[in-house]
Amino acid sequence: MPELPEVETVARDLARLVAGQRVVSARVLRERNIATPDAPTFISAIAGRAIRGVRRRAKWIIVDLEGGVALLVHLRMTGQLLVLPASAPLDPYVRAALLLDDGRELRFRDVRAFGRLALVACGDDGIPASSLDPSDVPLLADHGPEPLEPSFTADLLGALLARRPGRLKGTLLDQRCIAGLGNIYADEALWRAHLHPLAAGATLRRDEVERLHAAIVGVLSEAVEARGSSIDDYTGPDGDGTMQERLAVYQRQGEPCLACGATIRRFVVGGRATHICPTCQPLPRGGRRAGGELPRGAASGDRSDTRRGGRWSERVHPATVGATVAERAAARRRAVRSGGADPVGVRR
């Protein structure tokens, strides 16, 4: 899933490419991708509005339109926003398209069709406040602070961690704690900070919190500068990113650590693929490790889940390697709810 750097890149590209254009008309090719309002209302309400600007909040792209309305876009797993001539062939995975007054189209392409578009009303301060349907819950409610804003300090991070018991990795991925931080950059930040993902965030020392804060800000800033990581389906409207070439641990299982040469390991925390250097990120002991069953592959001496060779997509059943009993059960429940089979290799 595109994370803060990738979404920021898309927003910046779009601001340069479409700000000032007017939406002549809209097409919705898959209604389920429209979160709110219904597709006919979406089409009629967006037509004729000028694009004032494009920005980001958390993992949402906000396209500000005239008249106090904003188009919110969440890319989810495979969403892409492309600006193409209206005469360009229509990709079968395009789910919606906005015709602009200069003859180009802003197209939302999404292979897996998990992405969402929403047309919402904005408050006087420009913050998306509510859907055009007043009964809908605001889509941007309950997001935490932006980690690249000056207000995100080490003191604030320490206070956020102190209020959330449990594994550090899970806390970092909670959008109510830090907006926009995702799996790739959580792994990278923890490696830079020399912290294990199973550490209890509430017990970090002051120096550890400061290291983690510097690592989060540093890796996200570097990734934004590199236009994000073009892994799997991600690309920006103006081209790919290059951060994937600089990642230290993410999807580098079986390869040597760039700092110490130890073998990078992969295991699962909370259903998410997790990558560590067992030497640079030693497993905390006693009370400084979050409770619960220890995932296979998480301990320094456990090599059972190391995989060597080429990188592999996080979408290849991340629940199949190193999951705890509870995580395997949760993966089965998610598969059943979605109408699919049990994830391959998940042991009962």
Image (cartoon, rainbow, N blue to C red):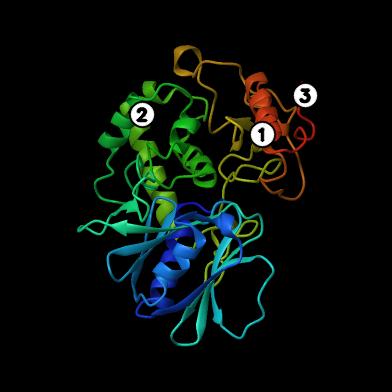
Mark 1 or 3, nearer chain start: 1
Image height check: is 232 above or below 250?
Answer: below
Q: Which residue type does callout 2 highlight? A: Leu
Q: CA distance from mark 1 to mark 3?
A: 18 Å
Q: CA distance from mark 3 to mark 2?
A: 33 Å
Disc 2, SS: helix
Q: Which residue type does callout 1 highlight? A: Arg
- The residue labelled by disc 1 is 337
Q: CA distance from mark 1 to mark 2?
A: 32 Å
User: In screen coordinates, is 202 left or right of 226?
Assistant: left
User: In screen coordinates, is 337 left or right of 33?
Assistant: right
- Tell me if mark 2 has few (under 14), some (14-19) or many (20+) residues whose alpha carbon lies within 10 angstroms of its own: many
- The residue labelled by disc 2 is 161
Mark 3 or 2, nearer chain start: 2
**What residue lies at 49% left-to-right and 19% top-to-bottom?**
290
User: Can residue 225 be spotted in the picture?
Assistant: no
**Residue 297 in the image, given as x and y percentages of width and height:** 67, 27
Disc 1, SS: helix
